[in-house]
Amino acid sequence: MLALAAASGGRLRLTDIAEKLQLPKSTAHNLLASLTRTGWLERDPRTREFSLGVRAWEIGHAYLTLKPLTQRAQPVMDSLRDLLGETVRLSVLVDQDNLCVAKSPGPHPLIFDQPVGARLPAHATGLGKALLSGLSAAEIHALYAEDALDVFTTSTVSTVDELQQQLDRVRSQGWAEDHGEYVPGIRCVAVPIRDDEEAVVGAMSVSFPVDRFDAEAEQARSSLLQAAAEVSRRLGAGHAVIGRG
């Protein structure tokens, strides 16, 4: 149905859809109602015709953004991994989660290893907080309609107000950290990546076991800021540096 709407140029009526898809009108009506309610389709109240909705645009835009992001980031991530000897990840924000889209595995095993394609709660991860830092306070409150957040460890932020305070610090200093907030024993530093409109379109992180964090965090933070700035530059961002080290 979405492919049909895309091919039609936005001039599809219920009868047309039912005929082209060989569906009973009642079935087509229910499907259209569901897709319209969830934003995949839009209905012109004057002509009663259907076209692709904002949700379809968001997914298409995300795909177009994601491909150049991973292509430009992977060589930089590999170099950063080789420099630090630690695992480097790249994530994007999907709803309330950070979605891992690329990884450069380090030589050291981790207690927990987020694989490519896995989603983790943004408020409880360094990558997620770096991604959330690109949203305004109003957008954060809209994203988290309920004030209480899921708590995974004793370090997990538990309210939206606490999260907002942490995000203010991320915006100010230019990086986010995860202090065992999703999995005890894992620490990470994460930095946002920006596109040619200076919007946060991804985040890159370096992960450590907690026993190596203090010794390696400063170098990792400095190197990660430079690496994220390089990926942002490759995406067209105008600033040479993302944040302050």
Image (cartoon, rainbow, N blue to C red):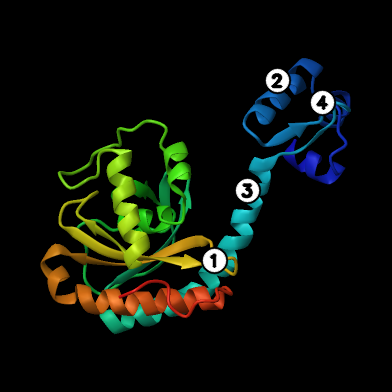
Instruction: Return the x and y of residue 236 as percentages of the image width and height.
Output: 59, 75
Q: Check contact, mark 1 vs mark 3: CB within 8 A.
A: no
Disc number lying in front (2 or 1): 1
Q: Check contact, mark 4 vs mark 3: CB within 8 A.
A: no
Q: How many marks?
A: 4
Res 226 visible: yes
| Label located before the other in sequence (2 or 3) | 2
Disc number lying in front (4 or 2): 4
How packed mark 4 is, by other alpha carbons closer than 10 Å (few <14, some 14-19, many 20 or more), is: few
Label 4 to label 3: alpha-carbon separation = 22 Å
Residue at far left of view: 211
Q: Amino acid at mark 1?
A: Glu
Decide: is 190 above or below 38: below
How packed mark 1 is, by other alpha carbons closer than 10 Å (few <14, some 14-19, many 20 or more), is: some
Looking at the rendered image, the quarter that the C terminus falls into is bottom left
Instruction: Return the x and y of residue 224 as percentages of the image width and height.
Output: 34, 75
- Residue 198 badge: 1
Disc number lying in front (1 or 3): 1
Label 4 to label 2: alpha-carbon separation = 17 Å
Q: Amino acid at mark 4?
A: Pro
Nearer the observer, 172 or 103: 172
Label 2 to label 1: alpha-carbon separation = 41 Å
Disc number lying in front (2 or 3): 3
